[in-house]
Image: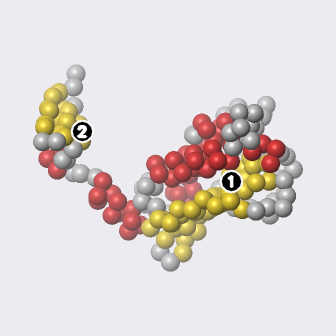
């Protein structure tokens, strides 16, 4: 993710949700949907609207980003109709969606703080989970400094490839160097 902002965070998460096969497969199949971006505004919203009454039986992901006191707070609400939560294979689609979201968060912004995933008691026909975490620019910069090496000599254990295609593998005081074809 480039520089943190509400717009970039929303775009990164929307793209990640639409490119995740497990999340897309958890939604009901529609005949009018030809591509995954058609799920925007039907199942995945980049703004939270929890008061909306859904007229169809389906799963939903609502999320939004707020900026407060120098950090970005991300809230993701995952809803599923009670009749769709457990499949014939006894797999909880809500748990599967939340696990996929956790993997997306770990991939997009591994420098997050204060991650939570909690169920919400509802009185209607939906089951809901709220996921939230905090992103700060200073945590992002610190994480990038710790996990980015500028020279192949700085790498203790790892694999590096330079611009000429030379590969260096280092581990446990052993160095293997070679060129790619």
Picture residue at 50% right of the left edge, 78% below the top: 69
Taking the image as shown, residue 160 lies to the left or right of residue 58, namely: left
Q: How is the image coloured?
A: secondary structure
Position of residue 178 measured from the top left corner of the image (x, y, whole percent): 15, 28
Q: Is residue 15 visible?
A: no
Tell me which corner region of the image, top left, top right, bottom left or bottom right, holds residue 119. bottom right
Residue 98's x, y, as percent?
A: 61, 50
Q: In which quarter of the image is residue 36?
A: top right
Residue at the disc numbered 2: 159
**Dot 2 or dot 1, earlier in sequence:** 1
Q: Position of residue 2 (x, y in %)?
A: 42, 56
Q: Residue at horizontal 29%, vertical 58%?
A: 146
Assign a secondary structure to mark 2: strand
The residue positioned 47% from the left and 65% from the top of the image is 113
How far across and down, in percent of the image, does residue 40 sit? 69, 46
Assess disc 1: are there few (<14), some (14-19) or many (≥20) residues with their C-alpha within 10 Å of its C-alpha.
many
């Amino acid at each position: 993710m480039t520089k943190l902002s509400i717009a970039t965070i929303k775009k990164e998460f929307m793209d990640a949700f639409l490119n995740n096969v497990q999340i897309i497969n958890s939604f009901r199949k529609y005949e009018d949907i030809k591509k995954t971006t058609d799920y925007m505004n039907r199942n995945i919203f980049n703004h939270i609207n929890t008061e909306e009454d859904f007229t169809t039986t389906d799963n939903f992901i609502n999320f939004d980003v707020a900026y407060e006191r120098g950090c970005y707070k991300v809230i993701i609400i995952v809803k599923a109709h009670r009749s769709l939560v457990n499949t014939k294979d006894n797999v909880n689609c809500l748990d599967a969606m939340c696990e996929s979201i956790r993997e997306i968060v770990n991939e997009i912004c591994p420098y997050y703080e204060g991650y939570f995933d909690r169920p919400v008691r509802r009185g209607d026909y939906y089951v809901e989970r709220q996921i939230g975490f905090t992103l700060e620019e200073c945590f992002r910069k610190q994480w990038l400094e710790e996990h980015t090496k500028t020279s192949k000599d700085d790498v203790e254990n790892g694999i590096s490839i330079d611009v000429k295609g030379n590969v260096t593998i280092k581990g446990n005081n052993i160095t293997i160097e070679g060129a790619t074809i």
